[in-house]
Amino acid sequence: MTEHSPVALRKRVEYLISCHAEAEQRNEWTFFVDELYAEDCVYSCEYAGTMLVRSEGIEEIKNTHYGRDMQHGWEGWSFPYTGIYVSAENRVITHWMNRGPGQRADGSYYETPGISFLRFNADMKIAEQLDLFDLAHQMWLCDQLEAAGLLSPVLCENWVVPTKARLIAMLGGGNAGAVAHG
């Protein structure tokens, strides 16, 4: 396995971050996938055991994570990065915020933290990505945004309401655990 230098890995992640910043502005999240992700990349997002979104390959990633999920209801959100941590074996951990639209009366942001685990292949493309964030905190944040009139009705209907229902059922002993969704 080709081991990339920490400097090269950091530079590649900084480029990914710049693509994300551009995607936030354009609300178009697929333009960088072919360039930065490996053909056989596996991208997963765990939603606290309520749902696993797992995409295999560039086309699935564009159709799920960056297409369906990011481009419908997340308008006005940003995802600023607060840290890049380069590890061994071409692995990088990034820390970012799910920052909702608007600000509170005190000037603080509506936001919750998230983390991504990335593994790069020999061609400096992302071969694996796992995203994690505190789902209960995210749901509470969406409640605050809704109370402030800042939550997108599309996001509420397509993501918040069904995710809350799965979380409540799971915590209440229901049978909603780890629903596969791709």
Image (tube, helix red, strand yellow):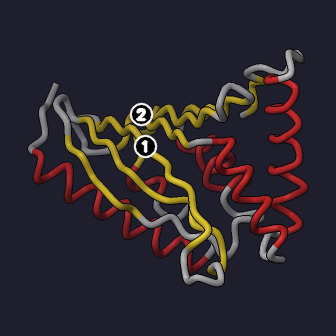
**CA–CA distance in space, label 2 to label 1:** 10 Å
Q: Which quarter of the figure has residue 98? A: bottom right
The residue shown at (77%, 20%) is 177
Q: Residues within 10 Å of mark 1 (few under 14, many from 20)?
A: some
The residue shown at (86%, 63%) is 154
Of the numbered discs 2 and 1, the one sitting upstream in the chain is 1
For residue 172, above or below residue 62: above
Relative to 162, 129 lies left or right: left
- Which quarter shows the C terminus? top right
Question: Residue 65, position in %: x, y?
Answer: 63, 48
Question: Residue 147, position in %: x, y?
Answer: 84, 70
Relative to 21, 17 lies left or right: left
Question: What's under tag 1, amino acid-wise?
Answer: Ser
Relative to 32, 99 lies left or right: right
Question: What's under tag 2, amino acid-wise?
Answer: Glu
Identify the disc placed on residue 79: none
Question: Residue 47, position in %: x, y?
Answer: 66, 35
The residue shown at (38%, 63%) is 17
Label 2 with label 1: CB-CB less than 8 Å: no
